[in-house]
Amino acid sequence: MPSAQLNRAMLTVRDALDTRYAEPLDIATLARLVHVSPEHLIRSFKSVFAETPHRYLQRRRVERAMFWLRTTDRPVTQVCLDVGFESLGTFTRTFRAVVGETPTAYRRRGPLPPAPGCVTRAWTRPASYASVSEKPEGARVS
C-alpha cells in the first residue's frame, strides 16, 4: 500500500476510534473498515502513530474521562461506563497508568480553570503510557 494511501487509511481508523471510543470496538472491525488484515492494521497503525490501536483507544478514553471527572458530578463508575470501559477495576488501573493517580484523586483537584479549549486539551492530554500491557493480537480493543 503506498504511503499516502496507508496514511489516509490509518487516519480513517483513528477517526473511528475518536468518534466511537465509547463503543465496543475490535481489531477485526477496524481492519474491515480500511480493507486490511487485523495484523496489518496493528503494524501499520503503530508505524504511523507510534502506538497500537488498543493503546490509542485506551488513552482516548482516559482523556475523555479526565474531562468529565473535572467538569461534571457524574459518579466515577458512570464515567467509566460512559467512556467505554466495561470494568471499574480496568478503568482505574488504566487511568492510574496514564495519569499517575486514581480517578477519584484526579477529581479532587477540582474543576478545570477557564481557558480556551485548545489550551485545556493540550495541557490535560496524556502523552502515552508504557506500564499497561498490550492486548494479544486478535483480542477486543475495548
Image (tube, helix red, strand yellow):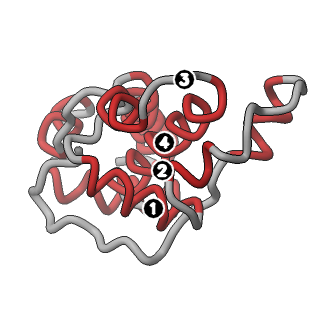
Q: Secondary structure at mark 4?
A: helix
Q: Residue at x 34, y 48 (%)?
A: 1
Q: Is residue 80 above or below residue 54?
A: above
**Foreground mark, 3 or 1?**
3
Front in this rendered view, residue 41 or 61: 61
User: N-terminal of the two: label 3 or label 1?
Assistant: 1
Residue tagged by mark 3? 73
Residue 71 x, y percent position in the rendering: 65, 25
User: N-terminal of the two: label 2 or label 3?
Assistant: 2
Q: Secondary structure at mark 2?
A: helix
In the visual, does 29 lie left or right of 105?
left
Q: Secondary structure at mark 1?
A: loop
User: Are dots 2 and 4 in contact, CB under 8 Å?
Assistant: yes
Categorize mark 1 by other alpha carbons within 10 Å: few (<14), some (14-19), many (20+). Answer: some
Q: Residue at x 42, y 22 (%)?
A: 19
Q: Is residue 80 above or below residue 139?
A: above
Residue 26 x, y percent position in the rendering: 17, 41
Label 3 amino acid? Answer: Asp
Can you tell which quarter of the image residue 29 is in? Answer: top left
User: Are dots 1 and 2 in contact, CB under 8 Å?
Assistant: yes
Disc 4 to disc 3, C-alpha distance: 20 Å
Q: What mark, if any, has residue 59 been given in the picture?
A: 2
Residue 24 x, y percent position in the rendering: 19, 33
Residue tagged by mark 4? 60
Front in this rendered view, residue 128 or 89: 89
Label 1 amino acid? Answer: Glu
User: N-terminal of the two: label 1 or label 4?
Assistant: 1
Q: Is residue 96 above or below residue 28?
A: below
Disc 1 to disc 4, C-alpha distance: 12 Å
